[in-house]
Amino acid sequence: MTGENHMPMPTETQQLIKQALTMVRNDLGHHLSPATRYDIYESFGDSRLLNYRYLEFEDFSILSFADNVLSWLTILTVRHVMPIWEHFVLGQKLDSRVLNAPTGMLKIAEGFLRKEISHDYAFGEFHETFYYGIDNYQKILDFRMYCIYMAAYDTMDVVLQGFNVEHPSLPPKDKLFSADFATRAMLANSISNEKSFSIHRKFDDESLIESGIEIDLSKRLEFWEWWLTEAIPQAWELAEGTRE
């Protein structure tokens, strides 16, 4: 999209991305804190999805441009790790609801953003089709698959009803580690061994290591570099393509 319809990425966002790249590269564990990510989200512009005070009152069928950017970012983030899910489930005897759930959730979220389906329909699918856990599959799914499944669930949560203060799909600024869509996708990309997800659900490195989960720091850095330099600009372009 060019010309007068083009909305350039804010200078503040570009500066925050540059600063975040420096921080994540210099950090020994290559962490990108929730607070830093949250600052980037806020820099997209006026957002209802980030402002939980509107949760009970706002019509989430109408999203601001910033909301569209954030929504596309969640989808792109999970799509990035979907090949891991697809490789894992080959040959697995899983309930079709679980087998197809991540792809289905992303499809519903994208359909809503592209205005192919209504918010009411998408929200109904979210609560009626996908509102069940995967706890019954603890012996089959490893921690990476749990992260991907829940990241896709977080995507629908963010896109359709925004930041939920009780069950945050977006990270609160006062926590160093948070189980949001980006953290889950990063872990799915970075964990180098298979481990049952039932043993631990804390997401800080110390807890994960104590649980026997191994993290490839080079893959973590690779993921955050992709997320900052490719996923965010692409989300911005997709939002331009789907805005009114």
Image (cartoon, rainbow, N blue to C red):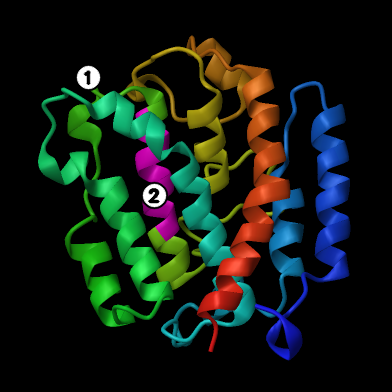
Q: Left or right of 173: which side holds 132?
A: left
Q: Which of the 4 image quadrants contains residue 27?
A: top right
Q: Left or right of 174: which side holds 165?
A: left
Q: Dominant secondary structure of the magenta stretch? A: helix
Q: Which of the 4 image quadrants contains residue 50?
A: bottom right
Can you give x and y, in whole percent of width and height, for residue 129 in the image?
18, 59
Label 2: few (<14), some (14–19) or many (≥20) C-alpha neighbours in 10 Å: many
Instruction: Identify the residue position indicated by label 2 in the image.
Output: 152
Disc 2 versus disc 1: nearer the observer: 2
Q: What residue do we see at 52% from left, 29% from top? A: 189
Q: Is residue 233 at least partly visible in the picture? A: yes
Q: What residue do we see at 33% from left, 80% from top? A: 119
Task: Point out the tag, 2 or 1, that comes first from the N-terminus.
Answer: 1
Q: Quadrant of the N terminus?
A: bottom right
Q: Is residue 202 at least partly visible in the picture? A: no
Instruction: Identify the residue position indicated by label 1 in the image.
Output: 139
Please, which residue is most extreme toward the front here?
2
Label 1: few (<14), some (14–19) or many (≥20) C-alpha neighbours in 10 Å: few
Can you give x and y, in whole percent of width and height, for residue 80 in the image?
49, 42
- Report the front residue among 164 and 184: 184
**CA–CA distance in space, label 2 to label 1:** 20 Å
Residue 1 sits above or below residue 81 on the image:
below
Residue 177 sits above or below residue 228 on the image:
above
Q: Which mark is residue 63?
A: none
Residue 34 sits above or below residue 54 on the image:
above
Can you give x and y, in whole percent of width and height, for residue 46 in the image?
69, 80
Q: Amino acid at mark 1?
A: Lys
Q: Amino acid at mark 2?
A: Ala
- Magenta stretch in the rendered image: 145-155
Q: What residue do we see at 72% from left, 38% from top? A: 225
Question: Could you tell me which secondary element the residue under label 2 belongs to?
Answer: helix
